[in-house]
Image (tube, grey):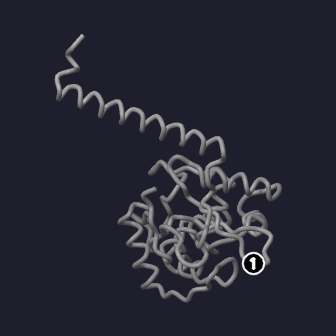
């Protein structure tokens, strides 16, 4: 996965995705609207207090990464911004509605449990139950072009593990002590062991053949 976002970039992308879904009539967003969205006190963790200059600088960084585009032109006095992060004609990153809602919430609020995600992401996409959220998280963790999320170790006294997005690089700190980023199942581990054994045998056969060539024995009938 090539995308790596700073905390402010993650907030901007999360806000653009959120507003595209929840208030499409007001999307793309002006710089003022985007700044207000970044500093919103609801559905945000942590709550930020960014000024327009900082948000503009962050947007410019995202434009250079081809993750945001500026909408303007003839007759438009106010520049407006839309994301090119996913589900657009500009890139290959595609998410299902459930996956997109979950990714958006993780960008906006950081690590959360499947139960929290089901409650919070339902405003962005209808989610039947926690099992549907867990299935989407599992898909995000196992995708060939990912992984995009990681499961964190369960906190003491908590019933559920939290999940974090990986669009800002590997998750570091105490949360990752002993974390299991959706490890392979037993059959998958067995397949890996078989492959490793096969590679070892091939390496041994290659070494033997090389020795025979060097000694001239390889050409004897």
Element on which disc 1 rests: loop
Q: Quadrant of the C terminus?
A: top left
Front one among 84 and 184: 184
Answer left or right for 104 relative to 213: right
Residue located 65% across and 41% down the image: 187
| 56 with respect to 191 (left or right) | left
Quadrant of residue 133 within the rendered picture: bottom right
Q: Quadrant of residue 189?
A: top right
Up the image or down, 163 lies above or below 34; here it is: above
- Give the total number of marks visible in the rendering: 1
Spot the residue most to the top: 221
Task: Indicate the position of residue 206 as horizontal and vertical percent values.
Answer: 31, 31
- The residue at 64%/75% (across/down) is 109
Residue at the image position 63 percent from the left and 56 percent from the top: 182
Q: Position of residue 156 (x, y in %)?
A: 75, 78
- Is 176 above or below relative to 202? below
- What residue sits right under mark 1 in the picture? 156
x then y, percent, for residue 84: 48, 58
């Amino acid at each position: 996965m090539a995308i790596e976002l700073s905390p402010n970039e993650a907030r901007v992308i999360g806000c653009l995705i959120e507003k595209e879904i929840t208030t499409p009539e007001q999307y793309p967003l002006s710089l003022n609207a985007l700044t207000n969205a970044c500093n919103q006190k609801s559905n945000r963790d942590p709550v930020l207090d960014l000024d327009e200059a900082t948000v503009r600088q962050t947007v410019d960084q995202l434009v250079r990464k081809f993750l945001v585009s500026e909408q303007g032109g003839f007759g438009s006095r106010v520049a407006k911004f839309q994301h090119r992060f996913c589900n657009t004609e500009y890139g290959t990153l595609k998410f299902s509605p459930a996956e997109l809602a979950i990714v958006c919430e993780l960008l906006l609020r950081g690590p959360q449990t499947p139960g929290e995600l089901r409650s919070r992401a339902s405003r962005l996409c209808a989610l039947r139950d926690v099992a549907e959220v867990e299935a989407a998280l599992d898909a995000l963790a196992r995708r060939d072009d990912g992984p995009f999320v990681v499961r964190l170790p369960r906190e003491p006294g908590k019933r559920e593990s939290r999940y974090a997005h990986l669009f800002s690089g590997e998750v570091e700190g105490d949360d990752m002590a002993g974390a299991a980023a959706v490890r392979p199942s037993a059959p998958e581990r067995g397949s890996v062991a078989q492959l490793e054994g096969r590679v070892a045998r091939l390496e041994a056969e290659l070494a033997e053949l090389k020795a025979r060539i060097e000694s001239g024995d390889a050409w004897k009938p």
